[in-house]
Every structure is written in C-alpha cells, then in structure tokens.
Amino acid sequence: MNVSGRMNIFSPPSLSKLFTQFLYAKAMRSKVAESNPDASFGDITKIVAKDFKNLSPEERAVWDDRAAKDKVRFTEAMANYSGPEDESDDGGGKKKKRAKDPNAPKRPMSSYMFFSTKNRERVKKENPGITMGEIVSFLQLIMDN
C-alpha cells in the first residue's frame, strides 16, 4: 500500500505470501477436488483461495513456516546449481536461433490435415455462412465418427 492507504497496482505482491499460497494450494487441491467432484479447475482454485484467506493466524503460521523452510532448501540447492552447459562460442549472452534450412523437406501432413483439406470446401458449400472455427469443429466431428 502507498501513503494514501490505497493499494499500488504496479508493485508486485510479496513473494513469500505467494509461495505460501502455492504450498497451501498444492496440498489442498486434491482434497477440495474430492469433496467437489463436479467443480472445474477454476472453481477448485477459487475454493482453495477462499479457504486460504479464511485460515486462522495459527494455521497460517504453519504454512508460512513450511514456506520459509522450503525457501531455505531452495536457496541451498541453487547455491550448488551451475545451470546448463552453454555450447555457444560467443562467450555468453543470448543463444542464437539455429538457421532453418530452406531446402529441408517439410514434415508429412497428418491424416486430419489430409481429411480437412479434402473436405473443407464441401462443408463450406453445404453450410453457407459458417465461420472458420465452426468448419474446423464440424470437420473434427465428421472425422471422429
């Protein structure tokens, strides 16, 4: 929050708070999914977030402690991590994208691509005014049956 008491939308939230939420969500997601079998992924996330906000200070302290311990573990692991080997000869910096050979053969078309190429015009003629997305969905239905 800034001096006026308003939240600054440009400042990132505390990473330790976010990490605590991630740990809590990871632990509770399966339990919430079991108790709400018809809930979508987004609904489960909303339920877990609401439960996290409603934690008592004692329960929250347990999750904050777990997050702090895992942060120490991560920091120690990163101290010993050297990263992947860089094969470039330029001494660092960004890796250059490998140049694509214009004479390289194209990948073979999938059976769906052959099918849709052959039947797209027929579907357009049979269903005037249909959008491209609807054509793709219709072709997928035809191919699946």
Image (cartoon, rainbow, N blue to C red):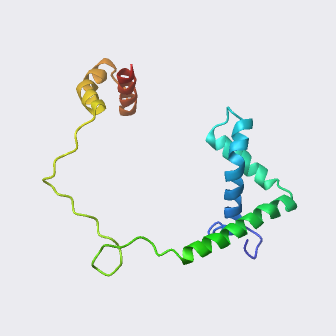
Residue extending farthest to the bottom is 91
94 w.r.t. 66: above or below? below
**In which quadrant of the rendered image does the N terminus lie?**
bottom right
Residue 64 location (% of width, % of height): 76, 65
> Which residue appears at 74% of the width and 36% of the height?
35
Q: Quadrant of residue 72?
A: bottom right
Residue 13 location (% of width, % of height): 67, 67
Q: Quadrant of residue 47?
A: top right
Q: Is residue 71 visible?
A: yes
Q: Quadrant of residue 42?
A: top right
> How many discs appear?
0
> Which residue appears at 78% of the width and 55% of the height?
53
Residue 111 location (% of width, % of height): 28, 30
Pick the residue in front: 43 or 10: 43
Residue 127 location (% of width, % of height): 34, 20
Q: Is residue 11 visible?
A: no
108 w.r.t. 140: above or below? below
**In which quadrant of the rendered image does the C terminus lie?**
top left
> Which residue appears at 69% of the width and 58% of the height?
23
Left or right of 74, for residue 132: left
> Which residue appears at 28% of the width and 35% of the height?
110
118 w.r.t. 99: above or below? above
